[in-house]
Image (spheres, rainbow, N blue to C red):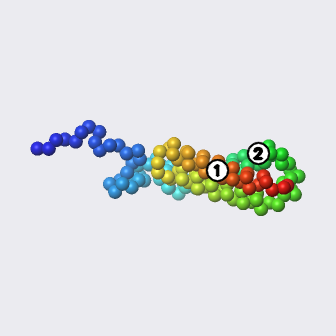
């Protein structure tokens, strides 16, 4: 006769996993399961995050002393690269937040770190150029 397992065994995992240790999609909330409607909503949210980061980008340049005239006479290549980098970071960050594994805090840190890092790099690319 064998003893029963101790209480709380097996230990609870932080994310629901299947028998092979993989993430169980059907145990996630509906908005994280990858259905077409929610996927489209996530793309819209990613574009919204991009627009917000573009606003912060232009605000930072304005606070650094750039004016409308500076934007008109400035070679826009750095601005285009910065906008593209912010778009890519926003989409990757939000999709990683929505569909990635890990705790909610880890996913928030990934999203915020990716957006903030790309924003700082974009400002660093654009500010040293003479308007």
Name the residue at 56% across, 45% down: 109
Viewer-closest of 60 and 28: 60
Which residue position holds label 2? Answer: 59
Does 42 sit left or right of 52 as displayed? left
In percent of width and height, residue 98 lies at 53, 50
- Residue 108: percent from left, percent from top: 55, 45
Q: Is residue 23 left or right of residue 114?
A: left
SS category of the residue bearing label 1: helix
Pointer 2: residues within 10 angstroms few (<14), some, or many (20+)? few
Estimate how packed mark 1 is, as few (under 14), some (14 to 19) or many (20 or more) residues with alpha carbons within 10 Å: some
Image quadrant occupied by the C terminus: bottom right
- Relative height, residue 39 to residue 29 (above, below): below
Image spot of residue 122 (x, y percent): 71, 54
Residue at 87% x, 57% y: name it: 73
Quadrant holding the N terminus: top left
Residue 39 is tagged as: none
Query: Disc number at residue 117?
Result: 1
The residue positioned 73% from the left and 52% from the top of the image is: 124
Q: Residue furthest front?
A: 128
Q: CA distance from mark 1 to mark 2?
A: 16 Å
Residue 117 % position (x, y): 64, 50
Residue at disc 2, secondary structure: helix
């Amino acid at each position: 006769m064998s003893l029963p397992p101790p209480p709380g065994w097996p230990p609870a995992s932080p994310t629901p996993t299947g028998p092979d240790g993989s993430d169980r999609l059907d145990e996630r909330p509906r908005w994280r399961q990858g259905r077409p409607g929610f996927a489209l909503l996530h793309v819209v949210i990613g574009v919204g995050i991009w627009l917000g980061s573009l606003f912060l980008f232009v605000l930072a340049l304005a606070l650094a002393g750039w004016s409308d005239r500076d934007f008109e006479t400035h070679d826009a290549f750095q601005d285009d690269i910065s906008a593209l980098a912010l778009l890519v970071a926003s989409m990757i960050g939000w999709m990683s937040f929505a569909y990635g594994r890990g705790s909610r805090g880890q996913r928030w840190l990934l999203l915020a770190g990716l957006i903030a890092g790309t924003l700082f790099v974009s400002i660093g690319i654009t500010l040293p150029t003479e308007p």
